[in-house]
Amino acid sequence: MGAIIKKELGVRAIWRSHIGLREETRATQEAWEFLMPWLGAYDRTVFSLGEYVPSLLSGRADIIYPTVEPLDHKNRELSIHELTCTLTSAALAASTRPSLNPSFDAPALRLQRDGSFAPATQPEDLGLLFRPIVTQISRWDHLKGFVPLLQGFSLS
């Protein structure tokens, strides 16, 4: 794609990678060698972490850490209707009334005292509709910042 863009449109092209390993192995070296004919067409490459940059791209890579766009639609404030429907559809809040939204395929589960998992509203509703909540939804790796989040929880 980069070669096509550069050749036909005469624009600069940048290749963005969100993946990688912290160390180079034989397998990663072979993968990067396989990709190099296509990556050679790009002016620069951008990676999420410095350790992800392969030695073959040294000097042609920049680092841009993953971020969240605060004005993105998914970061908007929800109306009480949207909030209630989402929490009840996910089984994170009990509802005695019908909802226009269908239930999620996999409702939320809650760790119980005996070590088992049960619906999140058991043994009682969490009260999510009636108290402030700070949450982070992401996979648990260092790029997602869960350590600062846990430190923030401990300070509150």
Image (cartoon, helix red, strand yellow):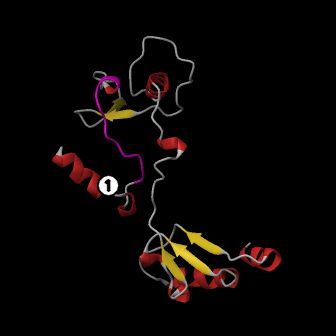
Comparing 104 with 137, the one in front is: 137
In the rendered image, the residue lying farthest to the left is 155
Disc 1 secondary structure class: helix
Tell whether position 134 is magenta: yes
Quick one: 13 or 58, which is closer to the camera?
Answer: 13
Q: Magenta part of the protein: which range? A: 129-139
Q: Residue at x 22, y 46 (%)?
A: 153
Q: Quadrant of residue 122?
A: top left
Where is 101 relative to 42, above or below?
A: above
> Can you identify the residue that label 1 sits on?
146
Residue shown at the point (52%, 46%) measured from the top left: 72
Horizontal and vertical percent for residue 35? 65, 80
| Type of amino acid at the residue the image marks with label 1 | Phe
Q: Residues within 10 Å of mark 1 (few under 14, many from 20)?
A: some
Quarter where residue 77 is shown: top left
For the point 83% across and 76% down, the residue is: 8
Q: Residue at x 58, y 70 (%)?
A: 16
> In the picture shown, does residue 111 fall above or below 53?
above
Question: Where is residue 140 drawn, in percent x and y?
Answer: 37, 55
Q: Quadrant of the C terminus?
A: top left
Task: Work out whether 134 lies above or below 59.
Answer: above
